[in-house]
Each structure stands twice: as structure tokens, then as C-alpha cells.
Amino acid sequence: MASSPITMMKMKLNNCSPPSTAAAARFLPLLGPHQIRFRSSLAPFHNPSFPRTIITRPTFSSSSIITAAMASEASVKVIDGKKVAKDVRDEINAEITRMKDSIGVVPGLAVILVGDRKDSATYVRNKKKACEAAGIKSYEVCLPENSTEEEVLKYISDFNDDPMVHGILVQLPLPSHMDEEKILHAVCIEKDVDGFHPLNIGQLAMRGREPLFVPCTPKGCIELLHRYNVEIKGKKAVVIGRSNIVGMPAALLLQREDATVSIVHSRTKNPEEITRQADIIIAAVGKPNMVRGSWIKPGAVIIDVGINPVEDATNPRGYRLVGDVCYEEAIKVASAITPVPGGVGPMTIAMLLSNTLLSAKRINNFK
């Protein structure tokens, strides 16, 4: 898991400063509302109104790096996660209304929070607000840090049996005295909207099998690529980080899209060299500004999952949020990139709502 915000706030600013307003990158246009269709799967979504983002494969040399670094920052396309997430939530809201009007069912999501971590409490609060806005009924259980596994398992069992609950989410991380695998395994697989049940992950890893649910953040990453018509098939993709929550399932999803995937992790001896070969980079390592401009091949597409607080005396809060990729350097080389914040973060909650709706439709056999 990534370091806590309190720990990360103590970090010193490095040479990667936030981009200026004057040098702000332009936003790539999204699909129009009349072109939106709600999709429960991750089948490629192509908008015919504008061409696919074609990732070129230039001969790589030091001169090409210099040329790319000199390119105008205004030429990069910003992948607007906030806009995509809003579109997804609007689609979900319309589908929930249709289901409620047709069969009288409202999707329900239960969230179990153990402990008093401020970041976890914030995530749960944001999920609850998103549920209410989308028309999903939310159920929340907050337990103290010293709660027992048996107490958590009892709530999970109750939600498993509750027909009004279609999705169950146990907020991670759990206190150290609890067996995370045991607790996640207790969630009924048909309600595992977080996608962390071992059987769902196993199905994701197997060719020819379909998981009931895909983990929300990796699903959001792929959805962003689809919505912006980034071609994945046959491309070289590098995932930086191999966590069970993001890195590993993201790599599996890219493989399902027929990308050639490499994973860079803490034991990788030549991470910069491997990353520089990628047409698509998904960075999910939890280290601020780790990926520099020199790591990026000209024209690559970057999905930055990281959200790291770093000390900033000019900010009223005393810190600012940065990704795992040095944005100011990356926009001089990449063809498209997600900002931090406002990129992947909004998509995670949108995909959770999507999974909850998918579960409600499946349980009630609603097409």
C-alpha cells in the first residue's frame, strides 16, 4: 500500500514543479452525449467522429528525446477523468431510473470501514456521496480499530444475505491484526463489486474466462483509454507497480486487450529502459514524480494512478498533490496524459457505481 498522506507530506519538493496556467495542455474532445451508451463490459468503444489516437513507433535515439522535449506543451492531450467520470455517472443514473421504473429495484451498496484512518474515511464519504448522486442506496458500517475479525465477518454475512444489498465493499487497508484474505474471501462473489475476491481475480487471469467484476481503479484506467479511442491491441504497455489493487489487475486487463505487457517493480534492474519502450504507461507505484521525461518514449500515452501529497509552502494547505509521473516533463514528450488530481481518481468511484449497477441487474436478471 502507498504511504500515508501524513508521511508523504513530509517529503521535500523536487525539481518537478506544477505546470503553469500559461502552459496548460489542451483537452482532447470527448464523445457527445448523443453518442454515449452505457457499457457493462470493457469492450472497445470507438467514437467515429474523430480518429483513433495512433501511437507511433519511432526509431528511438537520444536525438528523438531532445526533439520531443522541445515540442510545445500545448500539443499534448489531457485525458479528462472528471469529464469521463461524469458521463459514466450520468449513464448509470439513467439506467438506474430505467430499472426502478421497470421492476422497482434500486441498487444497494454496503461499505464496511474498520479503524479511524482519515484517508479511508474520506474515501468512504466520497463513495457515499457518489452513490446518493447516482441513485444508489448506500449502507455504511464504521467499526473501531480494535474490532475483531468475527465482527467484520458477521456484517459481511448479513450483507451477503440481504436482498437489498447488491454490492459489498470492505475498505482497505484493514488493521494489521486482521486477515485481509480471509475477510475478502467472505464477501459473496456475486456482490464483490470491488473485484478483489480471489475467484474474480483468478477468472481475470485466465484466458477464456470472465470475472463477475473487475477491480475499480484498473477498470477505470482501461475505460479512459477506450473513451479516448487509444488503440491498445498490439501495443507495448508497461505497468509500473504490481500491487493486488492496481498494478497486477491492470496488467491482466491490458493483456486481455492484446497488448504486450511488461511490469516494472521494486526489483526491476532497468526500469527506465523498459518504460522507455512503452506505447502505453500505467504508473501505480505510489512514489511522487518517479517517472521522468527521460523515461517516456515520444508519443506515449500515460495513465498516472499515483496521488501523492508533497510539501509545498506556497499552498495554503502546506502541500500539493502530484502523481507518480513528473507531469511538467511528461507533457513535453507524451501524446496524452491524465492529470493529478482529476485523472484516474474520479474514475475509481465511477467504476464502483458501474459494478454495483451491474450486480443489481445480474441478480434481478434485468437486461
Image (tube, helix red, strand yellow):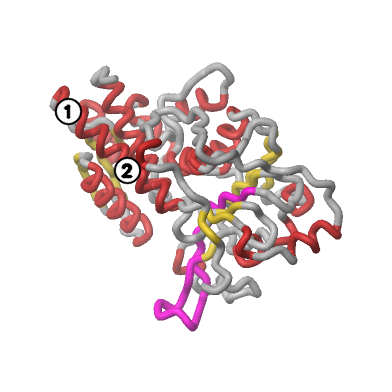
Q: Position of residue 243 (x, y in %)?
A: 55, 44
Q: State which quadrant residue 235 falls in.
A: top right
Residue 19 in the image: above or below residue 75: below
Q: Secondary structure at mark 2?
A: helix
Q: Position of residue 109 (x, y in %)?
A: 26, 38
Residue 286: mark: none
Is label 2 in contact with label 1 (beta carbons under 8 Å)? no
Q: In front: 79, or 365? A: 79
Pick out the residue farthest to the bottom. 314
Q: Is residue 45 magenta?
A: no
- Residue at position x 21%, y 29% in the image: 98
Q: In front: 181, or 337? A: 337
**Residue interval drawn in magenta:** 301-321
- Residue at position x 45%, y 33% in the image: 214
Please indicate whether residue 301 sits to the left or right of residue 95 in the image.
Answer: right
Q: Residues within 10 Å of mark 2 (few under 14, many from 20)?
A: many
Q: Position of residue 363 (x, y in %)?
A: 27, 21
Q: Earlier in the sequence, mark 2 or mark 1?
A: 2
Name which residue type carries label 2. Arg
- Residue at position x 85%, y 58% in the image: 62
Residue 16 in the image: above or below residue 294: below
Q: Residues within 10 Å of mark 1 (few under 14, many from 20)?
A: some
Please indicate whether residue 21 sits to the left or right of residue 367 in the image.
Answer: right
Residue 105: mark: 1
Please indicate whether residue 144 sits to the left or right of residue 259 in the image.
Answer: left
The residue carrying mark 2 is 89
Name which residue type carries label 1. Val
